Structure formats: C-alpha cells, structure tokens
Amino acid sequence: MSDINEDGLKKAIEQVKGAVGDKLVSAIKLEYKKADVSKETDVKALVDHVESWGGVDIMFNNAGIMHPKDDGALNTEDSIWDLTQNINVKGVFYGCKHAIASLLANKKKGSIINTGSFVGLMGAATPQIAYTASKGAVLAITRELAVCYAQSGIRVNSLCPGPLNTPLLQAFLDTEEKKTRRTVHLPMGRFGEAIEQAKAAVFLASDDASYVTGQDFLVDGGLTRAYVTGLPPSTGVPAGPENVLFGK
C-alpha cells in the first residue's frame, strides 16, 4: 500500500487490519511505503520492493487529485493543469509501466486497475477541465495497454466511479449550487460510497473477472445512462420554419 500521505497510510493499514481480523493479518504480509506517483523513481521503487515477494500480481493505480481551483478553460491556471496531469496521468502511466515490466519478467498473469471516472466518458456538470482531461487520458491508456498485453495474460481495466461521498468531492462541491448541479443527475438520488468502489476493484482484481479487460467499468449509480436534467435558463429553440411546431 502506498500514498504520499504517510499519516493517511498508517490509518489505512490499521483499518485493513481491523477489517480482516487478527488471524488473517498474521497470515499475510502487509506493508506500506510513502511515494509520490508523479515521480517515476518512486513508482519503480515500489514495484522493485515487491520483487522479493515474487513480483506484482495486482496493481491498483488509485492515486489522484481534483484540485479545488480546477475550473473551466478560461480560468484554470497552468500550475493546476500540470499538477493534475502529473499525478492523475503520469502516475497511472508509471504504475502500469512498471507493473507490466514486473509481470513479464516473472512470467505471470495479472490484473491492473486504473481509477478513471464517469467524466472520462461525458462532460462534467461543473467546470473541472484539468480533471476531466486527465481521466479521459486514463481511459485511453487503459484501452491501449489492455489490447497490447491481452495475450500475455495481463488484464487492464478502468474503474469509473460516479460522484462519491468522499472528502475530495465534498471539498470541490463547496457550494449548494455545485452540489445540486451534481445530485440532480443521480438516478439513485445519492452519492456513491467508497466501499462500493472497493468491492468493484476486488472483482476486477479477481479470477472472477478473468475474461474482462479493456473496460471502462462503470460504478456510477446509473449516472451515465440517465436522461440529463438541464438547469435554467434554456438556450431556446432555433428560429426557422422547420421549428414552427416547437415555437421560436
């Protein structure tokens, strides 16, 4: 397990221990290492660390940011754009690159899961151009690697959450207007929970998904299949005789 936030890592390790119980904890090796996924040397060091365990079996590239200053095309600063791409895109690329190298070197089949987003498939209701672009890149990386390494027994899928009830999203949706702009589109009437994504990730990692690769695996509460509800004002109907039935 790895993250740039060491305190967060320690808490996560304790949560895992509490969830699986003492008997299972004693039977498995559970370690953490601090890393910045935007730096290839850090990611390579993570993969190298598990070579003594026999190499990578599963890689879950889940690190990512949605910066509160991420906005539309006119207002997003270069620094926010670059930071987002460095973590969300380069981090996934480096994770895939070194996981694939380990799997091939050890002649193993394996599963790589990259965290995408529903906004990689459709426009976001609130402006977040850097994040949206980064997740589109993740889906493209995933598709290409899945095709390239399918016959090597390496499966690569994108896990695409809908809006989740996490501190990351709540920090971004910092006004009632922003929250309403999201919840109005959710058929299930609520944000998703992290545990629902975790269960999907476990499925993609497991042999139950042995014939699943190259997929944008949506766990979004039906959001991307919903009729989009627009907020006023309307753009109106184009003028012209062909639109007379609908008004002008």
Image (cartoon, rainbow, N blue to C red):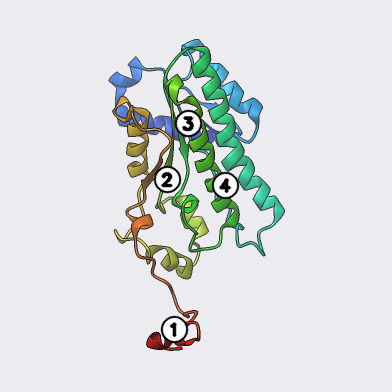
The amino acid pointed to by label 2 is Cys
Which residue in the protein does label 2 denote? 160
The residue sitting at 59% across, 30% down in the picture is 94
Tell me which label, 3 or 4, sits earlier in the chain: 4
Which residue in the protein does label 3 denote? 147
Tell me which label, 3 or 2, sits earlier in the chain: 3
Tell me which label, 2 or 4, sits earlier in the chain: 4
Q: CA distance from mark 2 to mark 4?
A: 13 Å
Q: CA distance from mark 3 to mark 4?
A: 21 Å
CB-based contact (under 8 Å), mark 3 and mark 1: no
Decide: is 51 above or below 139.
above
The amino acid pointed to by label 4 is Ser
Frontmost of labels 1 and 4 is 1
Q: Residues within 10 Å of mark 3 (few under 14, many from 20)?
A: some
For the residue labelled by badge 4, is the local secondary structure a helix, a strand or a loop?
helix
Q: CA distance from mark 1 to mark 4?
A: 41 Å
The amino acid pointed to by label 1 is Glu
Tell me which label, 1 or 4, sits earlier in the chain: 4
Asked whether residue 50 appears in the rendered view, the answer is no
Q: Which mark, residue 134?
A: 4
Q: Residues within 10 Å of mark 2 (few under 14, many from 20)?
A: many
For the residue labelled by badge 2, is the local secondary structure a helix, a strand or a loop?
strand
Q: Residues within 10 Å of mark 4 (few under 14, many from 20)?
A: many
Q: Which mark, residue 242?
A: 1
CB-based contact (under 8 Å), mark 1 and mark 4: no
Image coords of residue 3 (percent x, y): 53, 34
Image coords of residue 72 (percent x, y): 61, 62
Q: How many marks?
A: 4
